[in-house]
Image (cartoon, rainbow, N blue to C red):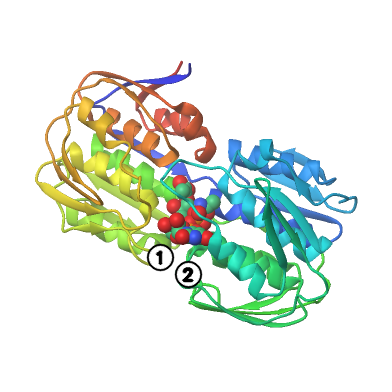
């Protein structure tokens, strides 16, 4: 079993360039199938979720080459629109291949997607969006069978909840539908804007991403494109929480502070000294974090659910009390019991968790999802003594080099 061995209590200092955004690159890689030919994706992070997505592309018949942070996907020989269970089960975002394959091939056959265990993760809104565009969607024998029987065309579709994945799926499918699609109630996350920018680079007529109404004029042939993925705001948030837990002074490059406005104001309230540049964030923390006003997770631009666990870990090492309300996923407190093994004071009641900061002690803890495992690393950096954090495979899904990056800032963390 792989673990991180961490000795806490060392302040962090130095500079880092943040990896490319996981939640942008996954739909962007799926979007490469919309055009015939070779697209080049730069700043592509080396993550197990990316590896699984590249495997899916290969299985579909694409030629995929990876050199450092650059991935080339040649879709000229795309010949298949069927993705089996084994690959679909690896990651949740595999579901966006539905929209992309429908647009390119007119059919898609997929098993149900996997991903982190955060409670039930239905895909009803994805299917509703595709059906509204006119796709014939059948759910049979544990699989999804989607076809364009010549009935798909641009229409208005209203999402009752701003689902990130359903918005992306609808955008990709709409690129293949003649006429105008308007997505009302769209998710506004920066990753959706990144996808829009890639689609535009391919020649698609898309506008409105970043607002709750996206307009796509579809049915035009698209061409391959070269695109650089934006920086990962959640990796940046995790490193800032690590500074909050361990103390120190760190500068992050390659991340847009405008993507983290709500999160950064919570860090400031907790006592961090922050300075932002056009594409950089500096943070100094000389005293332990204070408790802050209630943190309620919400769709963008609200407080991001993906930053809930790392922030909770940092506040556990501080002083004062903070209430968290997790509104996005029903089972996103699985890190709490593990934090308590390190001595954290946390009371959970349904969606609410109340955290009172106090010194933590290193312990053996087990991560069970991506951000929860990262949170345990954050807590271990702030705890006295040695910790062993297992669940590293979850971390490798979303962080390119968490231990190496933290070591470069002076942390004592070894991968064993
Ligand atoms: N939902 C439905 N039906 C649907 C789709 C979503 O009820 O058809 C519900 C979900 O159950 C959830 C809420 O809507 O309660 C939000 O889900 P959303 O679809 O927005 O999330 P997602 O697309 O599955 C992406 C990120 C997550 C991130 C969420 C929320 C990717 C690959 N994943 O997931 O990232 O937490 O948006 O911001 O983009 C992570 O990076 O650790 C991670 C889990």
Q: Residue 221 falls in which quadrant of the image?
A: bottom right
Asked if residue 225 shows in the view, the reply is: no
Asked which secondary structure carries label 2, the reply is loop
Residue 312 % position (x, y)? 25, 44
Residue at point 53%, 37% (across, down): 397
Q: Which residue is mark 1?
A: 300
Q: Earlier in the sequence, mark 1 or mark 2?
A: 2
Q: Residues within 10 Å of mark 1 (few under 14, many from 20)?
A: some
Mark 1 C-beta to ligand 1 under 8 Å: yes
Q: Residue 367 falls in which quadrant of the image?
A: top left
Asked which secondary structure carries label 1, the reply is loop
Between 19 and 158, which is closer to the camera in this rendering?
158
Q: Residues within 10 Å of mark 2 (few under 14, many from 20)?
A: many
Residue at point 40%, 41% (across, down): 371
Q: Height in image: 170 above or below 158?
A: above
Mark 2 C-beta to ligand 1 under 8 Å: no
Q: Height in image: 25 above or below 409?
A: below
Q: Which residue is mark 2?
A: 188
Q: Height in image: 206 above or below 263?
A: below
3D distance between C-alphas at marks 1 and 2:
6 Å
Q: Residue furthest front?
A: 141
């Amino acid at each position: 079993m792989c673990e991180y061995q961490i000795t806490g209590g060392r302040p962090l200092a130095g500079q880092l360039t943040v990896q490319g955004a996981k939640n942008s690159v996954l739909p962007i890689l799926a979007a490469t199938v919309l055009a015939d030919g070779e697209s080049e994706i730069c700043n592509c992070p080396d993550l197990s979720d990316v590896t699984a997505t590249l495997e899916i592309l290969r299985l579909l018949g694409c030629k995929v080459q990876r050199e450092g942070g650059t991935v080339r996907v040649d879709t000229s020989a795309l010949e298949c629109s069927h993705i089996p269970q084994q690959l679909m089960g690896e990651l949740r975002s595999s579901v966006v291949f539905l929209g992309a394959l429908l647009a390119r091939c007119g059919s898609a056959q997929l098993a149900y997607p996997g991903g982190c265990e955060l409670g039930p993760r239905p895909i009803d809104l994805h299917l509703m969006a595709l059906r509204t565009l006119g796709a014939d969607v059948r759910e049979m024998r544990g699989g999804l069978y989607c076809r364009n029987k010549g009935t798909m065309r641009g229409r208005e579709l209203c999402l009752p909840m701003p689902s990130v994945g359903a918005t992306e799926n609808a955008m990709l499918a709409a690129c293949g539908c003649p006429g105008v699609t308007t997505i009302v109630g769209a998710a506004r996350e920066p990753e959706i804007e990144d996808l829009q920018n890639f689609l535009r680079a391919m020649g698609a007529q898309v506008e409105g991403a970043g607002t709750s109404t996206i307009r796509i004029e579809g049915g035009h042939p698209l061409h391959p494109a070269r695109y650089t993925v934006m920086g990962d705001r959640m990796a940046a948030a995790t490193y800032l929480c690590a500074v909050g837990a361990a103390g120190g002074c760190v500068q992050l490059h390659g991340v847009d502070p405008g993507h983290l406005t709500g999160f950064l104001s919570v860090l400031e309230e907790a006592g961090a000294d922050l300075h932002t540049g056009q594409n950089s964030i500096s943070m100094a923390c000389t005293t332990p974090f204070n408790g802050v006003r209630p943190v309620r997770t919400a769709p963008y631009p609200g407080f991001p659910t993906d930053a809930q666990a790392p922030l909770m870990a940092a506040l556990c090492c501080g002083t004062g009390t903070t209430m968290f309300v997790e509104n996005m996923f029903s089972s996103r407190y699985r890190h709490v019991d593990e934090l308590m093994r390190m001595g954290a004071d946390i009371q959970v009641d349904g969606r609410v968790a109340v955290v009172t900061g106090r010194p933590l002690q290193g312990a053996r803890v087990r991560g069970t999802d991506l951000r929860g495992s990262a949170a345990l690393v954050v807590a271990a950096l702030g705890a006295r003594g040695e910790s062993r954090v297992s669940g590293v495979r979850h971390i490798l899904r979303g962080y390119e080099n968490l231990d190496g990056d933290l070591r470069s800032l002076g942390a004592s963390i070894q991968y064993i």
